[in-house]
């Protein structure tokens, strides 16, 4: 679990001099092994939970791992680059489907990221300064994040049913906005329905992170800005946003990776085969490994996805870090 | 730049999660002095709890008889195949399990299930106890089966007698043309002629397969090579999609019905007059439908049959019982298989579930001498075809079933699904099978 701590940790010295820098008393270079010892279990767990399965996945992508071999992977014949060749032949149905799924996921991720962040930012600014019932509002905002994914997403899918769903009941029967009952779970609308559900799921986390980030912005800065005649918008632009930059850097990256890899929400929402219009990449890979029993091609797709995410992450970090050092 | 390092680590581990998602195992079987078998049962009743209630007395009887405890878990259909695959990959699984009989050949190819060779068959009472139709769906031809039939099922056409009388229809339709005509008559206001589970991959493939048999089509040739994109298969899918598209006798909303109960619920609640379903007397009673309103007949057939077309009205449906190859309690597992397929247990369980017994002897019970059971038994013995017994069967079901689901969705949202479009989808599905 990622907590919203990195912001304060980012180093008070990086900020303006208005906060007195708490100089840590320098201990002698004794017991330096202790931090490493404390880190050891985490490192082992990381190795066990992430690195080893990842390497196994990479290995699987070079095998012809179909149902004939899943009992004994070592017997699976090598496939060389065949799995990659198969998934990347973009003039054939399988490659086209992967490409389509990839673009769907890119658009999905961008929209979800933008909406979640904007919503979280608005809510965080609104609840930044104390008012009666602020705790209640904050708690209410966090509810979607606290609910079990399965229960909440299933409820959404009930609400979005065409004939008996609450959404159509309100839109068509009560408000009369539409003459015909639209489909939400199949067809073009399913993509937007999925975005709404995903944003609803995700934005509380962004809200939490931004709220935590804002709480460490010194009040003096706002006072100074107010004295200089800055309104709310200018305060947000020149005080809040610059102070939140380190939080945002991590937050956007984490949200990006989560959304791009999102599986639980579409799987719960659509069942084991998603409509074409909302065929996210993780669902697509699942279909190609678990459902069609072809773990080799599934792994090859996963490896390609991993490479893509690593490249995006690296470029992102490079750009944002360079900008920060340029700003400094 | 501590932050940078944290960010990188977080990013790396999150990216890695996409790969790590490809593994995973499941719980193992218990052991100790007293043998406890782990049994994965499929969901046959109206709910998982209902299944537990139905199974528990039988399992208690088995424990009393043999001293072997059975730890049962009812696995929903949406999870069952995944659970079995995970168990196969890890070698950690149940001792005895239910499988959909259409998966038999696919699972046989994994080697995860114990083979019932002649000696093993003798041990559980001999192969000739079972219905031959159901036994034909326990694995690839020419190989020892890897499962035995537990509950036998077939598709039938359920119709609402009261609605038929009201519309002046005296007989259930026997031909497809008659069926469509009747369905049009029965479609009035917010009531529809027929309901289908259009978002369900398995319902779609079962129906389309039956229609393809009638059209003279085939999805695999004799050598087991896929032949998806043929005019016959296109016609079969068109026939199904047209229920929403041109005949307009099914509610377009049916295209999003996917949990395997909604079309039947519509029928039970009077929102549709007919439904093509596997033996459902139990579920219909549970849903509150009056018994005297329920009629059942074979699924209608094309008349005249096209060249090469077969008089097939159903797939050989049903649930098989298998023993996991990695079990540490093979003897006890076989004892349990024998118990579950014994005449008494077969009578008790099939009576409750509304399915057909898999062993001949059980049909002596009066419960299985009703008109409905006769209809289903006749379909199963004479007019049912097993799904293709090829290792790629599961992929085939998923690929075609999903394609049909998407086409129904298009038809429901007003896009016309042409024969060319169907042909294109079938060709694409076949290419994806090649992976």
Image (cartoon, coloured by chain):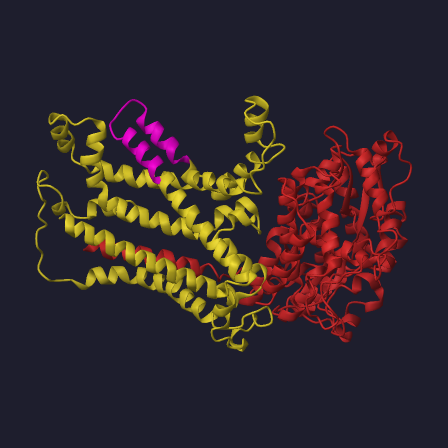
Chain colours: A yellow, B red
Q: Is residue A45 visible?
A: yes
Q: Residue at 43% across / 68% down in the picture?
A: A58
- Percent coordinates x, y for residue B111 in the rendering: 63, 71
Dominant secondary-structure state across the stretch colored magenta: helix
Q: Residue at 45% across / 62% down in the picture?
A: A302
Could you say which is closer to the camera, residue A42 or residue A102? A102
The answer to whether A196 appears left or right of B196 in the picture is left
Q: Is residue A15 above or below residue A221?
A: below
- Percent coordinates x, y for residue B127 in the rendering: 81, 68
Q: Which quarter of the rendering shows the C terminus of chain B?
A: bottom right
Q: Is residue B139 magenta?
A: no
The answer to whether A186 appears left or right of A218 in the picture is right
Q: Which of the 4 quarters of the picture holds residue B89?
A: bottom right
Could you say which is closer to the camera, residue B183 or residue B72? B183
Q: Is residue B377 above or below residue A51?
A: above
- Percent coordinates x, y for residue B316 in the rendering: 78, 58
Q: Which residues are magenta?
A: A117-143
């Amino acid at each position: 679990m990622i907590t919203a701590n990195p912001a304060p940790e980012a180093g008070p010295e990086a900020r303006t001099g208005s906060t007195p820098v708490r100089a840590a008393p320098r201990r002698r270079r004794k017991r330096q092994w202790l931090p490493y010892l404390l880190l050891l279990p985490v490192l082992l767990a990381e190795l066990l939970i992430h690195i080893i399965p990842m390497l196994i996945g990479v290995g699987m992508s070079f095998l012809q791992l179909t149902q004939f071999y899943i009992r004994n992977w070592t017997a699976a014949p090598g496939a060389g680059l065949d799995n990659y060749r198969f998934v990347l032949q973009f003039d054939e149905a399988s490659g086209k489907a992967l490409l389509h799924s990839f673009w769907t996921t890119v658009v999905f991720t961008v929209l979800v990221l933008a909406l979640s962040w904007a919503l979280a930012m608005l809510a965080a600014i609104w609840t930044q300064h104390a008012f009666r019932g602020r705790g209640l509002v904050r708690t209410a905002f966090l509810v979607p994040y606290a609910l079990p994914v399965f229960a909440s997403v299933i409820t959404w899918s009930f609400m979005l049913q065409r004939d008996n769903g609450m959404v159509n009941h309100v839109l068509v029967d009560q408000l009369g906005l539409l003459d015909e009952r639209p489909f939400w779970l199949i067809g073009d609308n399913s993509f937007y329905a999925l975005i709404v559900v995903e944003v609803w799921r995700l934005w509380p986390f962004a809200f939490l992170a931004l709220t935590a980030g804002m709480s460490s912005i010194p009040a003096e800065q706002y006072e100074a800005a107010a004295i200089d005649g800055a309104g709310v918008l200018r305060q947000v632009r020149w005080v809040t946003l610059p102070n939140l930059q380190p939080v945002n850097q991590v937050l956007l990256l984490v949200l990006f990776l989560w959304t791009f890899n999102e599986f639980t929400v579409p799987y719960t929402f659509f069942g084991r085969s998603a409509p074409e219009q909302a065929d996210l990449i993780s669902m697509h890979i699942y279909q190609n490994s678990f459902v069609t029993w072809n773990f080799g091609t599934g792994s090859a797709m996963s490896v390609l996805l991993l490479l893509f995410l690593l490249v995006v992450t690296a470029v992102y970090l490079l750009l944002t870090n360079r900008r920060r050092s340029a700003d400094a | 730049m501590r932050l940078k390092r944290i960010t990188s680590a977080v990013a790396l581990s999150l990216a890695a999660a996409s790969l790590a998602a490809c593994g995973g195992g499941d719980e193992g079987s218990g052991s100790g002095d007293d043998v406890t078998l782990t049994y994965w049962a499929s969901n046959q009743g109206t709910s998982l709890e209902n299944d537990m209630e139905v199974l528990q007395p039988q399992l208690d009887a088995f424990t009393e008889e043999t001293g072997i405890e059975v730890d049962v878990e009812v696995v929903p259909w949406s999870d069952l195949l995944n659970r079995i695959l995970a168990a196969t990959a890890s070698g950690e699984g149940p001792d005895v399990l239910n499988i959909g009989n259409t998966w038999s050949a696919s699972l046989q190819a994994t080697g995860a299930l114990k083979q019932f060779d002649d000696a093993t068959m003798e041990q559980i009472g001999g192969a000739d106890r079972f219905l031959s139709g159901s036994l034909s769906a326990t694995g690839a031809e020419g190989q020892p089966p890897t499962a035995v039939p537990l509950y036998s099922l077939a598709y039938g056409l359920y119709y609402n007698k009261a609605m038929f009388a009201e519309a002046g229809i005296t007989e259930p339709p026997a031909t497809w043309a008659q069926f469509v005509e009747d369905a049009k008559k029965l479609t009035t206001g917010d009531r529809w002629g027929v309901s289908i589970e259009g978002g369900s991959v398995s319902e779609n493939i079962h129906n389309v397969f039956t229609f393809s048999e009638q059209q003279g089509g085939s999805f695999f040739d004799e050598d087991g090579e896929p032949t998806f994109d043929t005019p016959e298969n296109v016609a079969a899918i068109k026939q199904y999609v047209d229920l929403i598209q041109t005949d307009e006798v099914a509610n377009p909303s049916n295209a999003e019905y996917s949990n395997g109960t909604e079309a039947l619920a519509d029928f039970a609640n009077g929102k549709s007059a007919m439904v093509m379903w596997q033996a459902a007397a139990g579920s219909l009673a549970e849903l509150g439908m009056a018994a005297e309103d329920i009629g059942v007949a074979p699924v209608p057939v094309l008349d005249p049959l096209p060249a090469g077309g077969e008089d097939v009205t159903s797939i050989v449906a049903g649930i098989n019982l298998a023993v996991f190859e990695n079990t540490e309690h093979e003897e006890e597992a076989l004892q349990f298989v024998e118990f579950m397929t014994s005449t008494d247990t077969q009578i008790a369980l099939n009576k409750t579930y509304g399915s057909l017994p898999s062993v001949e002897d059980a049909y002596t019970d009066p419960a299985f001498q009703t008109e409905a059971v006769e209809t289903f038994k006749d379909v199963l013995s004479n007019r049912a075809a097993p799904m293709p017994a090829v290792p790629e069967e599961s992929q085939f079901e998923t690929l075609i079933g999903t394609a049909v689901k998407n086409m129904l969705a298009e038809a429901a949202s007003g896009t016309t699904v042409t024969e060319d479009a169907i042909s294109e989808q079938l060709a694409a599905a076949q290419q994806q099978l090649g992976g």
